[in-house]
Amino acid sequence: MKDTPADETPQPALTYNRDSFLLPDAEAGRMARMISPLESARLGYRPAGPRVLAAKAAHVTVREGPATASRSHAQAIREEFPDLFGAPVVRFEAGTSEATRRPLTVGVVLSGGQAPGGHNVIAGLHDALVEWHADSRLLGFLGGPRGIFEPDHRELTAAEIDAYRNTGGFDMIGSGRDKIETPEQLAACRETSAALGLDGLLVIGGDDSNTNAAVLAQYFVTHGQPTAVVGAPKTIDGDLKGGGIEASFGFDTATKVYSELIGNVERDALSAKKYWHFIKLMGRSTSHVTLECALATRPNVALIGEEVRQRGWTLEQLTDRVAAAVRERAQEGRFYGVCLVPEGLIEFLPEVGALIEEINALLADGAASSSLSQRLTPQSAGVFNTLPDRIREQLLLDRDSHGNVQVSRIDTEALLIETVRRRLAGDAGYNKKFSAQHHFFGYEGRCAAPTNFDANYTAALGRVAALLIAHEKTGYVCCVGDLAAPAAEWTAGGIPLTSLMTREKRKGEWTPVIAKALVDLEEAPFGELATHRDDWCRDDAYVYPGPIQYFGPPEITERTTRTLQLETSAE
Ligand code: FBP
C-alpha cells in the first residue's frame, strides 16, 4: 500500500466512451464495468469530515471519559461480557498518539441489509490505515460474517477501493445475515483472525450485528486473541441510535429516495384523483423511516407502529381510523389519498403481536411450520383464523438468523386495503367508491448512491474504526457526533458496545442485545407529525422533495433528515 495523504485521494483512471465510462479492467479477460456519468462524477467527491480526523492518524490522541454501564440488566451483561463491561467512552482529539505506529492488518465485514455508504466506511478505514503506516493491509471478508468462520477473504487494494468511493451497495465484498454464535463458529473466527494476524476486525452492521461484534470481542479477549473488534452503526431502519449514537448510516439516503417516490405518488394521486395509495415502507419493527418520510412529504395518513402499540389499537380499531380518513376526504369530494404503513406495523397490533410471539416460541422449540396453527392458544388461533390466507402463510415464514420475523415479506399494506374496503362496504352511510393501489418501497433505497451526508458520515466512521483499532480499543462502536452541525465540527470517538445493551427474549431465551431504538412518542419528530396530521389528512398538503441532489446549493445538497434536525435541536 502506498502512503496517501488524506487530501489527495487518488482518482481511478477512467476511459470516456461516448456516453458512459469504463472502469479499468480489474482482471484480465473480464469485461470492464460500465459506469454512468453520475457515478463517475461521484468517484471524485471528497467527503468532508470532522476537523480532528483531517489530521494524520498519528496526530490524534485518545481522551477517556467516565466508566459506562449498560442500558439495563447490568449484572447479567457484566457476567456475559466481564472484560468489556464498564469501559469508558473515548473521544479523539488533536495531539500526539501514544500508540505505536506499526503496520496494521485489519479485516472488514459487511453484515445484514444493505445501506448507502458501506463502501465509504471501507474507503475511510483504508485511507486511515495507510496513513497510520504505509504497510498496513485491509482484508475484506466476502459474503458477510460467514466469510470469517468459513474463511473467504480478499485483500482490498487501493485501486479497487477507489473504484467504489461514494457508490451505493455492498457489492465490493458482499454482505450476509449469518450470525456468529455456535462455539465452533466462534472458534473458527479466532482461528481465521490468528492465521491472518488480524490486529482488528470492523463489523459494519445493525443492532444485532453489533451485538455479535461484542460477543466476538469478549470471546477474543477470553481466548487471548489480540484482535480488536469494533462496530460501525449501519441500517436504513434508523433504529440503532441513542446512548451517544445520533444516527445509523444509510437512513438519510434511503428516506430521501422513498420520500422522492412518495412525493411522486402524491402528485399522481392529486392529478388523477381516483386512487388511495397504501405505501408500505421498510424499517423493520420500528417506524423511523415512515415518520421521516411523513415529515418530508405530508401524506394524508401516516401510521406509526409505536403509537399503535401504546394506544393498544387492534386491527379493527386501526381499520376504523383509516376508514374514517377515507370517509372524511370523500365528504370533500376527494376520493384519493396517500397512506404510509411501516412494515413492522403488524407486530405492534396487540393481538397479532401476541400471535407472532407464540409462533416464534413454537418455531424456536423446533415445531414444523405446517403444525403451528394447531398448536396455538385458542385466543391466538382465533386471531390467526381471521387473517387472509396470504398473511397467514407469510406469518409462518422462516425467521431470520437472529429470530426476527421477516416483516418485509408480510403484505400489511394489502391487508389494510382489504380491511378498510370491508369496513366501508359495511357502512350504510358510505356508498361511495374506494379504489386503492398498494406499493412497497424498501429495496429501492438501500443501495442508492449515498447523499453527501451519508458519504461524509461513513468515510468518517471508517477513519474512526482505524483509530480505535490502532489504539487497541476492542468492543467499541465507532461514534461520530454533532451530526446536525457542519461536517468539520463533528466529533469522533468510540462507545463501548456493552453500554448500549439490554436483555431480550430471542429464540425463547433471555439474551443480551443492543436495544433497538423505537420511535419516542414524547420526542419532537413524532410531535411534529401529531401536531399537523389532521390538517394533512383533510387538505392536500403534499410536499414533493424530488430526487437527491449531489451537486448544487448546500441548502439542497447538505440537508439532513428532519428527524435529525428535530432530535438535535430539542437537546
Ligand atoms: P438491517 O437491519 O440488517 O440493516 O436490515 C434492514 C432491512 O432493510 C429491513 O428494513 C428489512 O426488514 C430487512 O432488511 C429486509 O431483509 P432482507 O434484505 O433479508 O430481505
Image: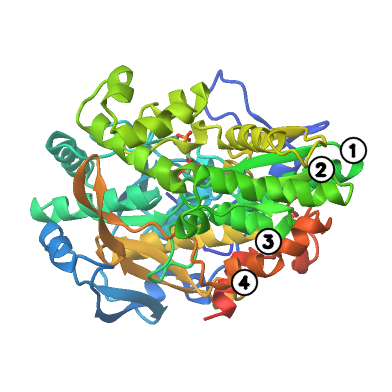
Q: Within 8 Å: ligand 1 and the Cβ of disc 2?
A: no
Give the tally of numbered discs.
4
As helix, strand or loop, the secondary structure at mark 4 comes to helix
Q: Are marks 1 and 2 in contact (CB under 8 Å)?
A: yes
Q: CA distance from mark 3 to mark 1?
A: 24 Å
Q: Residue at x 80, y 66 (%)?
A: 553
Q: Position of residue 411 (x, y in %)?
A: 56, 32
Mark number displayed over residue 272: 1
**Residue depicted at 64% across the width and 66% down the height:** 530
- Give the percent coordinates (x, y) of residue 227: 21, 53
Q: Earlier in the sequence, mark 4 or mark 2?
A: 2
Q: CA distance from mark 4 to mark 2?
A: 31 Å
Q: Amino acid at mark 1?
A: Ala
Identify the residue position indicated by label 3 in the image: 295
Q: Nearer the viewer, mark 3 or mark 1?
A: 1
Name the residue carrying label 2: 336
Q: CA distance from mark 4 to mark 3?
A: 11 Å
The first of marks 1 and 4 along the sequence is: 1
Q: Toward which corner of the image does residue 524 lie, by quadrant?
A: bottom right
Which mark sits nearer the N-terminus, 3 or 1? 1
Q: Give the residue type at disc 2.
A: Tyr
Q: To which residue does mark 4 refer?
A: 565
- Looking at the image, residue 394 sits to the left or right of residue 139; the answer is right
Question: Which label sits in the foreground, 3 or 2?
Answer: 2
Front position among marks 1 and 2: 2
Residue 65 position in % (x across, y down): 29, 81
> In this picture, is 50 found above or below 253?
below
